[in-house]
Amino acid sequence: MYRIFVAATLTASAAVAGSSALAGDPTPPPADPVVIEPGFTWAGPYAGVQLGYLNGHIDWSEGTQGGDVAAPEGRRASPDADGFVGGIYGGYNFATSGNLVFGFEGEYNWSHADGSDQIPVIEGPGDTLESDIESTAALRGRIGHAMDRTLIYGAAGIAWADLELSWPGTTASETMTGWTIGGGVEHAFTDQWLGRIDYRYSSFDDENNFAGTGANVEMETHELRVGVAYKF
């Protein structure tokens, strides 16, 4: 009987001691929540400025004028224009869960591209035909493949160009309309600042009566630009 009493007493003492030890241990603080920063996305609006170089090939012709003024096949000249171009652009990108990025973009550029050529005649040096591409614009759709912060894209759409031509006794200008295609590489240096290199080829409709002068004008342009944009 004595042994049973001693064993019960020891067991109760151990239980009380264990409970006291547990009560004395501080409760560990909860772990700090893990904050996951959102990754970069190409989706959203953007706007920027660009500067580059324009080269334009221009074909001008008119019908035979008769007499000794015109060459037998009619007067023709190619006052190809080249020079600097700069302007603004902006658009909106949509990004899929994969690497596909697509969207639309508009741009307007002021141009300092000009040139001249001699209009051949049967006798004499001929008249000088001068060209001046005053501005260009485009509305394009874009589609590309994103590799994290680098985007390789292609673009196509509609293009406009303000062309002025002048020759002795005549100065005429017209906004020409055509199609455009091109592409480029764009990189996000930060979540907001984007830089790119963009190339655009444009072909403009054949104008059979340029600005009412009766002349026929065809034009194609190549533009290579460097741009910086802010993503909102």
Image (cartoon, rainbow, N blue to C red):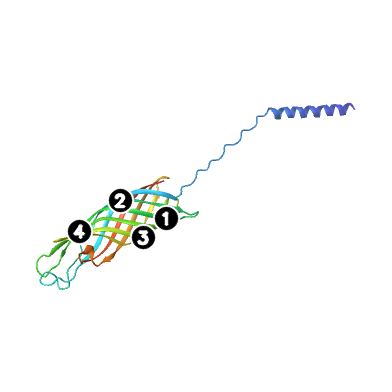
Q: Viewer-nearest of labels 4 and 3? A: 3
Q: Which residue bears the numbered disc 3? A: 157
Q: Residues within 10 Å of mark 4 (few under 14, many from 20)?
A: some
Name the secondary structure under disc 4. strand
Location of residue 115 by image quarter:
bottom left
Q: Label 4 amino acid?
A: Gly
Residue sticking out furthest to the right: 1
- Which numbered disc flags the more N-terminal residue, 2 or 4? 2
Mark 4 or 3, nearer chain start: 4
Is 196 above or below relative to 215?
above
Which element is circle 3 on? strand
159 vs 3, left or right, is left
Q: Is residue 74 above or below residue 36?
A: below
Name the residue type under label 2: Gly
Q: Amino acid at mark 3?
A: Gly
Alpha-carbon distance for marks 2 and 4?
21 Å
According to the picture, the residue beneath numbered tag 2 turns out to be: 87
Query: Quadrant of residue 157 in the image?
Result: bottom left
- Separation of marks 2 and 1 at Cα, in angstroms: 20 Å
* Cβ atoms under marks 1 and 4 closer than 8 Å: no
Measuring 78% from the left and 27% from the top, which residue is drawn there? 13
| Residue that label 1 marks | 103
Alpha carbon separation for disc pair 1 and 3 = 12 Å
- N-terminal label among 3 and 2: 2
Gap between marks 1 and 4 measured at Cα = 35 Å
